[in-house]
Image: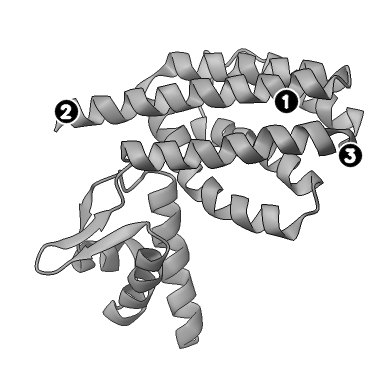
Amino acid sequence: MKKETLKQHAYNIIKDKIINCEYAPSALLNEEMLKEDVQASRTPIRDALGRLEQEGLVTILPKKGIMVAPLTIREINMVHEARTLIEPFAILHYGNKISDEIYQNYFRIFQRDTANVSDLNEYYETDKQFHQMFIDATSNDYLISTYERIAQQNTRLRIYSGRKSRNRLLASQQEHLKIVEYCLKQDWALASKAMEEHLYHSKEASFEAAFHADRSE
């Protein structure tokens, strides 16, 4: 395996574990632990950590270790402010670019009972794809690249807040269903408004998860 491939492999694994909260927000990591998890030597791991630090996902603390970026109130505010500017806009102006067949498929998915969902990763992936769909529909490279960074942190928020409250998963499903219903009616103004409301509730759930974490420490 080439050096560059080893570096990319280490980067992908560590980043995936951070984004999917296997490495929890504010957790302290160390190189020995990462070497075992990634099955790689110190050099590719250090390269990966350098890249992840530039992306704001870790902070390297001299003589202490590597801290996974916390989900602070400021971070939550920034993520949701950006999402509220972009996602309702995308639905309002580009929701009509998505076929009825796709909306109908999501309608069926969000009608399912999530109370007995065993594979939460599958649920989170569907959630992620649903929101990404509207951004991709814009075909705007600038919006898509901007949203890519937002989506990284939002995946962490989505998983973290969902783990803290199963009720949030159920509420989120109903909010998604409402968005899809308006899209099927081609009422883009109400679909956009429903997305705004969904993002507001998601933000509140993220705050609650952050406060819960603070009280637990």
> Which sits in the foreground, 194 or 113?
194
Residue 97, label in figure = 3
Residue 192, label in figure = 1
Hey, which quadrant is residue 75 in on the image?
A: top left
> Which sits in the foreground, 10 or 144?
144
Residue 205 to residue 174: above or below: below
Q: Is residue 71 visible?
A: yes
Return the disc, 2 or 3, that comes first in the chain's sequence: 3
The answer to whether marks 2 and 1 mark residues whose Cβ atoms lie closer than 8 Å is no
Cα separation, mark 2 vs mark 1, equals 36 Å
Residue under the image location 69 percent in, 32 percent down: 88
Residue under the image location 60 percent in, 55 percent down: 146
Residue 63, label in figure = none
**Image location (x, y in percent) of residue 109:** 71, 23
Residue under the image location 50 percent in, 20 percent down: 201
Hey, which quadrant is residue 66 in on the image?
A: bottom left
Say which residue label 2 marks. 216
Tell me which amino acid carries mark 3. Answer: Lys
Q: Disc 2 vs disc 1: which is toward the camera?
A: 1
